[in-house]
Amino acid sequence: MRIDIVTKEFPPTIYGGAGVHVAELTRVLSSRADVHVHAFGGAREPDYHGATVTSYAQPAGFESANGAVQTLVTDLDIVGDLDGADVIHSHTWYANMAGHLGGLMHGVPHVLSAHSLEPLRPWKAEQLGGGYALSSWAESTAYHGAAAVIAVSEGMRRDILRCYPDVDPAKVHTVHNGIDTQLWTPQTGTAALAKYGIDPDKPSVAFVGRITRQKGVPHLLRAALQLPEDVQLVLCVGAADTPELAREVEGLIGRLRAEREGVVVVEGMIPRGEVTQILSAATVFACPSIYEPLGIVNLEAMACGTAVVASAVGGIPEVVDDGVTGLLVPVEQADDGTGTPVDEEKFAADLAKALSTVLADPERAKAMGEAGRARAIQHFSWETIADRTMEVYAAVAR
């Protein structure tokens, strides 16, 4: 069976959980099928663990166009190269239209994986302007036309059917995200800690993620004001989505630094080896997201043997076993699609309380970390996920 995967992110250009998912799924699927990857961006190595890789730079003449228009033009560039596929599998709205049109053009089933949903990310209008209407149209069209939709969690499946009630529930399948527990594993090295000024002898709360409304960084920064004074806060963050959010976060970090020591900010993408050292050294990992289809970053922390405190939203409760691998923080959210906590002060206080609970008991934190790694190994292996994905392919390719 030939599987053509369409994706915006692919090694070495990965900036989020969807990119990690595609890379790992491709690695494992390539031993089960003839896999062809079609990825946005500059030239890459043409072979990835046995999969054939083709890259697509943005077509000339659209340099000043809206980002959503640039995406759709790149999608059109991919469509012709999907000829010969038995199944087309697209990931995120960026690639969904290529998959949708490719399926129609070549008469093959289009499967898409739902890593997020545009109706639940209205803050993207700040980034894309009118392009948000285009991205929403592209996603909706692809979901309604797909032969199968793969949700990365049961929470995500519920969101899909709520946002797109006309989609047939029978074609929406749940296949969780996964983790490579050979790559994400507890580390004892301290070179990265020394490099970034992290004290390995002090308790610490770590965060890894982009500065986007979805990830809830401002809520964590407000919660950090309420943590014990000796606790370090280590933030490994990417660039902010908008200048307004960047200013908000910078202001909160400035306030935090004015009131306490041990605030470490690591900006930009850093090597996985450094991330695993930081996660392994942390007493607890914090995930304050207000929207998270699954939250692969929680799996990464768990695989490194670190306790997790996370908001109980989306698919996170399917990953973090409350009271066993960490603590979940309930949050009442506005029903306007933004996911904004109804009471932001309460959410920050509840987050601080849960973090403080884990920080106050290092032995319990250690036990939670060990249980988290065991759970990651047992329930979220990429081999299992690849087998489930192949089952979906087989069902639509009949």
Image: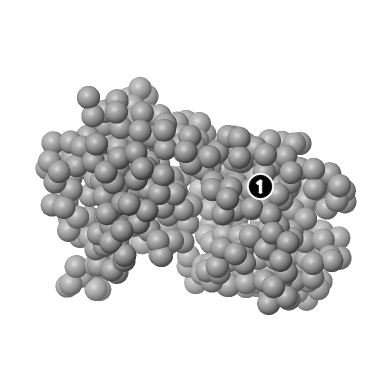
Q: Which residue is mark 1?
A: 302
Q: Residue at x 36, y 61 (%)?
A: 128
Give the x, y percent position of residue 393. 30, 32
Residue placed farthest to the top in the image?
170
Q: Residue at x 37, y 53 (%)?
A: 49
Quadrant in the picture for the N terminus? top left
* Colour scheme employed for the rendering of this structure: one colour
Say what secondary structure mark 1 lies in: helix
- Give the left or right position of residue 342, taking residue 162 as reference: right
Give the x, y percent position of residue 129. 35, 61
Mark 1 Cα-neighbour bin, 10 Å: few <14, some 14–19, many ≥20: many
Q: Is residue 83 visible?
A: yes
Q: Residue at x 41, y 33 (%)?
A: 387
| 275 to 353, vertically: above or below | below
User: Amino acid under label 1?
Assistant: Met
Quadrant in the picture for the C terminus? top left
Give the x, y percent position of residue 201. 84, 66
